[in-house]
Image: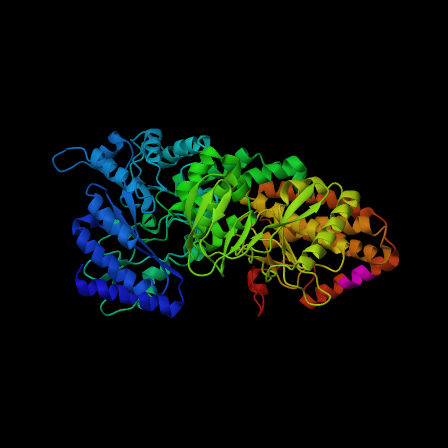
Amino acid sequence: MADDVVTVTALRIAEHVKAHGLTSVCVVLHGGEPLLAGPKRLGWIAGQLRARLDPLCVLDLRIHTNGVLLDDRFLEVFARWDVKVGVSLDGDRPANDRHRRFANGRSSFDQVVQGIERLRRHPGLYAGLLCTIDVLNDPIAVYRTLAGLEPPRIDFLLPHATWDDPPPRPTPTPYADWLIAIFDQWLADDCRASIRTFESIVGDTSTTESLGLQPSDLVVIETDGAFEQADSLKTAYEGAPATGLHVLRDDLDAVGRHAGILARQRGLEGLCDICRVCPVVTTCGGGLYAHRYRTGSGFANPSVYSPDLRKLITYIRDRSTGRHRLRIDGLAHGLGDADDIRHLVDSQESIRRALVAAAGAAQEAWGLLARLDETHPKVVQEVLAHPYVRAWAAERADDHPAHMGNIAAAAAIRAGVTADVAVEVLAGAVHLPTLGMLEAPGENRRLLVREGQFVLEGAGSWHPQRRLTAGTFSIALEDTDPFRDCHGWPAAARLSSAQVKDWQDAFSSAWDLIEHEFSCYAPGLRAGLTALTPLSPAPAGRNVSATARQAFGAVAVALPSDAETLALLLMHEFQHVKMWAILDVADLYDHADTRLYYAPWRDDPRPLEGLLQGAYAYVAVTDFWRVRRRTAPDIGNVRFARSRADTAKAIDILAKSGAMTSLGKRFVAGMRATIAPWLDEPIPDAAMRTALSLSQEHARAWAVAPDRILSQEESEVPGTSPG
C-alpha cells in the first residue's frame, strides 16, 4: 500500500469518526500475508492510523497473520503501537498440514505454534485464533489443540462456498455435526475457551458477521486504495466485492450509500422468503451474505449452509435449555419456587460468561480473570453475577473496553491475591463491581492489589457498596455502578446517608409485607433479586420502576411514598426479571412476528414480547390487589377488578395470536390457569362498574375495540414504536 493511500485512508476514517460522532473504530490489517510488509513498514502504517484516530476515538487496531513469520521484531512493533494479533491455525498438526504446507511440502505447524508461543508472552497483544473448518479433520483434536494455546478467543469459519460451488458434503449436515462435537466438549469443559460462534448463539447477541441480523459495518480498502465490500464476496463471482469507489477520491459516506453495502444492512427485510419464516432466523440471520449466492437469483437465497446452521442453532438452544433445566410450569403460573429461580440463575451464568468473554477476552485483564476462575471460581462467579457486569458486556464494552480490568480487579481483591491491573477511570472514579467506588482523578490507571487490599496512586475517598437488609435477606443498594443507567429512566446519583436510611426503612417494611401477605413470592425473590437501583424521583403522583434484559437480578425503582407501593413494585418488576431470563433460554413466540398489539395497561402498542412481558407482570399485580383489597377495599377492589380483566384479555390475545411456539402455548396456558379462578371471585358492584368504566375509557382512547389485534401497519402512528 503506497504512502499516499495509507495517509488518506487514515484521514478518511478520521473524517468519518468526526462526522458521525463515533466513539470507537476497528481497523484490521490483513489479506495475503501482511507480515511480508516487514516490521518497519507495519510500524509506520500503525503510527499513521494512531496519529489520526487516537485523539478522536478508541482505535482497536489489529493484524491477522498465518503466524509463520511472527517473531520478536514484529511483536516489539505491535507492542509499541498496541496492535492486537490474530493467527490462523486449523488445529492439530494433521489438520493444519492438510491445507497449510509450504511450497516444498514441508509442514508449517511448528513455525506457527512457535509464533503463537511468542505471542502468548504478550497477553495484551494476543487477539485469538481463527480456524477454517474441514470436516475431514478430527473436531476434538482441533478443539483441544486450539484451546491448549489459551487464546482469548477462537473463531471457527465455514469454508467459503456458494450454491454454484457448494461445499463438500459427506453427510447431510457435516458442518453442524463437526461443530456440535466441539460444542459438547466445550460444555463439558465449562465453556472455558471463548468460542465466538457458540457465544453468539447462547448469548443471543451475535459478535460475528456470519450470524445474526445486525447490519454489516465492514468495508475493505485494497492495497491500491480501492474500496471494496467484504472479501468473502470474491467467492460469489468475479468482481463481486467491487464498488467502483477509491479512497483518494471518495469518502466513507459514499461507500455507505453503495447498493451492495446497503443490501447487507437490511436485516430481516433483506432475506429471502424462506429465511424470513425460519424459526432460527433471528440467530442465523441468513448466514454469511456471500454463502447465499446462486446464478440467476443472486443473493436472494438461504445460505448454502442453511441445513447446518439450522441444526447447529437448534441443537445449541436445546442443549442450553436442557442444561439449564428450565422448569417451565412453576414459572408459567406466575411464581416459580426457589429451585425454579436458581435454575434461571444458573442459565444466566453461562450467558453472562459468554458475553463477558466476547467483550473482554482481548483485554490484558482477561488473563488474570481466567487464572482466578481456576483458583477462586466462587469469587469470579460472584463478581460476574453483579447485574451490571452483563449490562457492560452486552451494551457498553465497545465504548469502555478497559472496564474488563475493573472486573478482574474486583475478583482479585475478593480472592486476596496479588495483582497489578489496568483499570478504567470513569467520571472521576474507579468502580469495582460488588465492592464499591474509588474516587480517582485523571485517566485510566493501574491498581495494585495485595491480600485483599488495594492501592491507586493519587486516589481519593472510597465509597463501599451499600446494602439493604431485612432479617436474613440482603441485597445491594446500587448507586455507584457507571453502567446502571440502562433502565429507561435516569438513575439517581450517589445517595446521602439520610436517603440510604429512607431506602432501608422502606425496604424493611416492604419485605415484611411480602413475607407475611405474599409469602409465596418471597422464596423466588430471595433466590434471584440481588440489587435495587434507585432511580431519579418520579413526577408527583407517579411511581417509576423498571428492569433491563441485560441486568438480571436488578430492579430499579424511584423511592415511592409508602412501603406498600415498594412491595408491589418489587413483585411486579421481578416478574420482568424472570421473564427476561426465560426468554434468554427458551423460544416462547415466533420472532418473525412483527405485529403490534393492544395492551390494556399501556398507551402505546406493544410487540408480542412486550405484551407477553406485561401479561406476566400483571399476574403478580393482580395477585397483589386480590390480597390487599381485604385491608384497602375501596381502592383494592377496583384495582383487582380491572387488573384481572386486563390480564385475562392480554392472555387471550397471546393465545389467539397464532405466534406462540408450543412451549409458549404451554406458558400462556399456565398464566391462564392462575388467573381463571380469580375471575370468579366476588367484587362489589360499584367497584366492578368503576373498573369497567376505566377499561372502556382506555379502549376508546385507542379508538379500537379492546380485543382487536393491531397489525404493524394499523398501529404506525406518530409517537409510537414497536419497542
Is residue 693 inside the magenta stretch? yes
* Residue at the image position 53 percent from the left and 33 percent from the top: 323
Looking at the image, residue 286 sits to the left or right of residue 101; the answer is right
Residue 162: horizontal and vertical position, in percent? 30, 46
Outermost residue toward the left in this view: 104
Is residue 614 inside the magenta stretch? no
* Residue at the image position 46 percent from the left and 60 percent from the top: 441
* Residue at the image position 29 percent from the left and 47 percent from the top: 85
Residue 480: horizontal and vertical position, in percent? 57, 55
Residue 546: horizontal and vertical position, in percent? 63, 56
Q: Nearer the viewer, residue 27 or 79?
A: 79
> Which stretch appears magenta?
690-694
Q: Nearer the viewer, residue 74 or 107?
A: 74
Looking at the image, residue 482 sits to the left or right of residue 122; the answer is right
* Residue 236 in view (yes/no): no
Name the dominant secondary structure of the magenta segment.
helix
Q: Using the image, determine if residue 596 lies above or below residue 409.
A: below
Looking at the image, residue 564 sits to the left or right of residue 602; the answer is right
Report the label total: 0
Q: Nearer the viewer, residue 478 or 701?
A: 478
* Residue 28 in view (yes/no): yes
Residue 495: horizontal and vertical position, in percent? 63, 59
Q: Quadrant of the N terminus?
A: bottom left
What is the image's colouring?
A: rainbow
Q: Quadrant of the C terminus?
A: bottom right
Q: Nearer the viewer, residue 107 or 423?
A: 423
Residue 710 lies in quadrant: bottom right
Q: Using the image, determine if residue 176 lies above or below residue 692.
A: above
Looking at the image, residue 723 sits to the left or right of residue 616; the answer is left
